[in-house]
Amino acid sequence: MGKEIRSVVNILDLSVDEINHLMELADAIEADPGKFQECCAHRKLAVLFYEPSTRTRLSFEAAMLELGGQVLGFAGADSSSAAKGESVADTIRVVSNYADIIVMRHPKEGAPVVAVQNASVPFINAGDGGHFHPTQTLADLLTIRRTRGRLEGLTLGLCGDLKFGRTVHSLIDAMLRYPGNRYVLISPEELRLPFYELEKLEKSGVLYQEVNSLEEAIPDLDILYMTRVQKERFFNEEDYLRLKDSYILTPEKLLKSREDLAILHPLPRVNEISVQVDKDPRAKYFYQTLCGKQMRMALILFLLGLDKG
Amino acid sequence: MNIDGIENGIVLDHIKAGRSMLVYRYLGLGKLQSQVALIQNCSSGKMGRKDIVKISETIDLDLDVLGYIDPGITVNYIRDGKLVRKENLEPPETLENVLKCRNPRCITSTEQELPHIFQISNREKRMYRCIYCDTVVKRKEFDLLPG
């Protein structure tokens, strides 16, 4: 019987033990990158991006290159056979013959499920529309653990667009598996967390509160996870203009925060975090991208079965 | 109104009133050559009103479709005028090409060849979830694919 092929579509495809293992591996990479620089020699990562992305695609490519592997792929549906109408299933079957592991971003939700059904090599979902983006969550988890030393017993402030923000939903799903966390959901009424996510918080019996004011919530927080409030999410411009500034993080708003607060953001940032905050030691969003690359390295090693060497 | 009993075939009893046309459509009963009777709004001690479908032929029924439309249906198999087997239905675990995913962002909206597959996500509320995009279909939405 052949070895089971592991793939990651949703953050919940990985157990807590596996995520802990990946974080330990990422820490080992951080401590001694040279030890890992040939681990993926002669291995190829196919990077199939059906829609534009800067960080995620480059992060995966950098991850594979730093492991000594090679990358091939495309960075837009126009430059792939999808433009000729090829199905995801067919593309994945073909690319399985070219690469040892596949990473895909696709605008349609559920495309990774089709990919996994047809892949004969490990597969990683790098984002499917507004659905899942598990490697962003891996980056978030490692950043939280490294900056706060743990993933339990924290007060997490999630701020901005909690309705459509897939990164927020995945982070909540992942953090609910660690005990003792408290959630402060900071958003305008229009962008509250959807019912199905609130239901998960209710069922888990964790403490949570929904608030409007970032300023009032800040003093209690261990983690502040910022997201972008997009203009197109509002019914009218008046509401947008009224609310947009309340969810912009500035040095003034940080005056009452704890010294050891960690500020995260999945990026790209537009204006929701003032650039003046970048110099503050509490700003961890650029460091988060380094954590993301190291977690992607760990994940590639794990899925290729090269993590034990 | 009298409708004869059947000698050999199937009687679908205890159909929620008004659902017999859905049953007829999704079991493809219109394609049969044998006699089929749809009886709507019969009096029922237990249900008040109910529908009944009688099929004068023993066919392979898609019990998953029936179980989704109405798990309260009783399937009675008749041979030589006698009841030989009675089956109660359960809401099915998986529905393949029965429901259509409504999410315009779902991969099934662009890749027409993909089967529409739903899995039960809440047995009590009889909610089904698209295996691709996780969109949930609630019990009352009969967004069925053409039968």
Image (spheres, coloured by chain):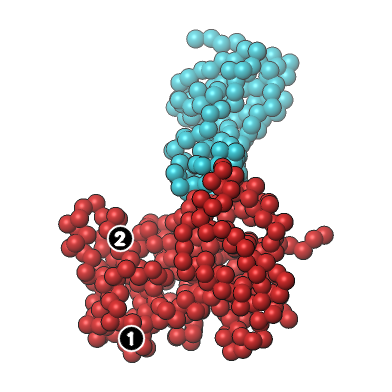
Question: Which residue sits at x=51%, y=55%?
Answer: A76
Q: Chain of mark 2?
A: A
B140 or A90: nearer the eye?
A90
User: Could you tell whether A242 is left or right of B79 in the image?
Assistant: left
Q: Categorize mark 2 by other alpha carbons within 10 Å: few (<14), some (14-19), many (20+).
A: some
Q: Earlier in the sequence, mark 1 or mark 2?
A: 2
Q: Position of residue A20 (x, y in %)?
A: 59, 78
Quarter of the picture containing the C terminus of chain A is bottom right
Judging by colour alone, the chain drawn in cyan in this rendered image is B
Quarter of the picture containing the N terminus of chain A is bottom right
Q: Which residue is mark 1?
A: A279
Q: CA distance from mark 1 to mark 2?
A: 25 Å
B40 or A173: nearer the eye?
A173
Q: Position of residue B90 (x, y in %)?
A: 60, 40
Numbered disc 2: secondary structure: loop
Numbered disc 1: secondary structure: loop
Q: Is residue A245 above or below residue A9?
A: below
Where is residue B56, by image quadrant?
A: top right
Q: Is residue A141 above or below residue A173?
A: below
In the figure, the shade used to draw chain A is red
Q: Amino acid at mark 1?
A: Lys
Q: Amino acid at mark 2?
A: Gln
Q: Chain of mark 1?
A: A
- Confirm whether residue A61 shows in the render: yes
A149 or A233: nearer the eye?
A233
Question: Which residue sits at x=65%, y=28%?
Answer: B61
Where is residue A242, by image quadrant?
A: bottom left
Q: How many marks?
A: 2
Question: Which residue sits at x=36%, y=85%?
Answer: A282
Q: Position of residue A186 (x, y in %)?
A: 30, 69
Q: Which residue is mark 2?
A: A230
Q: Is residue A49 above or below residue A44?
A: above
